[in-house]
Amino acid sequence: MSSNIQAMIANVSVENLDDAIPFYKELAGTEEVRRFPYRELELALVGPFLLYSGPVENYVSQTATVLVGSLDPVLDALGKAGAEILEEPNEVPNGTRIVARHLDGSVFEYLQLRV
């Protein structure tokens, strides 16, 4: 699965995306910013950082998001590792995702972006 991973994303809750984006652009060393809505949240992808603002308590419980090229090897690896699949592959506005709880209790979202 490791060769399938494209990026790890740190989820960061901010009060205002417009105020936070310049700081994370400098931190990530990139000018590229992708903004998109997700339910009641406002999201911005800045390098390895997924910034969100809004009523996060209902929607964001993941400790990290992992961008992958394909979800099939992820499902195989999660099964072999004994992880609990919290959400089977499902469509979200920016792609398809799986949410899994690993044996250590950590929760990860595996996201294959829509191209």
Image (cartoon, helix red, strand yellow):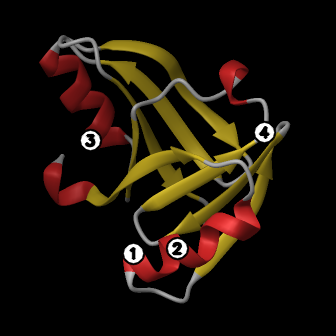
Q: Residue at x 49, y 52 (%)?
A: 112
Residue most toward the right?
Answer: 40
Looking at marks 1 and 4 on the same chain, the residue that comes earlier in the sequence is marked by 1
Residue 110 at x, y = what percent?
Answer: 42, 40
For disc 1, the neighbor class at 10 Å (few under 14, some 14 to 19, many from 20) is few
The answer to whether residue 35 of the structure is visible from this angle is no
- Name the kind of residue labelled 3 in the image: Pro
Q: Is residue 23 above or below residue 98?
A: below
Q: Residue at x 75, y 69 (%)?
A: 18
- Name the kind of residue labelled 2 in the image: Phe
Mark 4 — residue? 54
For disc 3, the neighbor class at 10 Å (few under 14, some 14 to 19, many from 20) is some
Q: Residue at x 72, y 61 (%)?
A: 17
Disc 2 to disc 4, C-alpha distance: 19 Å
Question: In front of the other: label 1 or label 3?
Answer: 1
Q: Quadrant of residue 73?
A: top left
Say what secondary structure mark 3 lies in.
Answer: helix
- Name the kind of residue labelled 1 in the image: Leu
Foreground: 73 or 110? 110
The answer to whether residue 103 of the structure is visible from this angle is yes
For disc 4, the neighbor class at 10 Å (few under 14, some 14 to 19, many from 20) is some
Mark 2 — residue? 23
Disc 3 to disc 4, C-alpha distance: 33 Å
Say what secondary structure mark 2 lies in.
Answer: helix
Q: Is residue 81 above or below residue 94?
A: above
Mark 1 — residue? 27
Mark 3 — residue? 73
Q: Is residue 51 above or below residue 32?
A: above
State yes or no: discs 1 and 2 in contact (Cβ < 8 Å).
Answer: yes
Residue 45 at x, y = what percent?
Answer: 57, 64
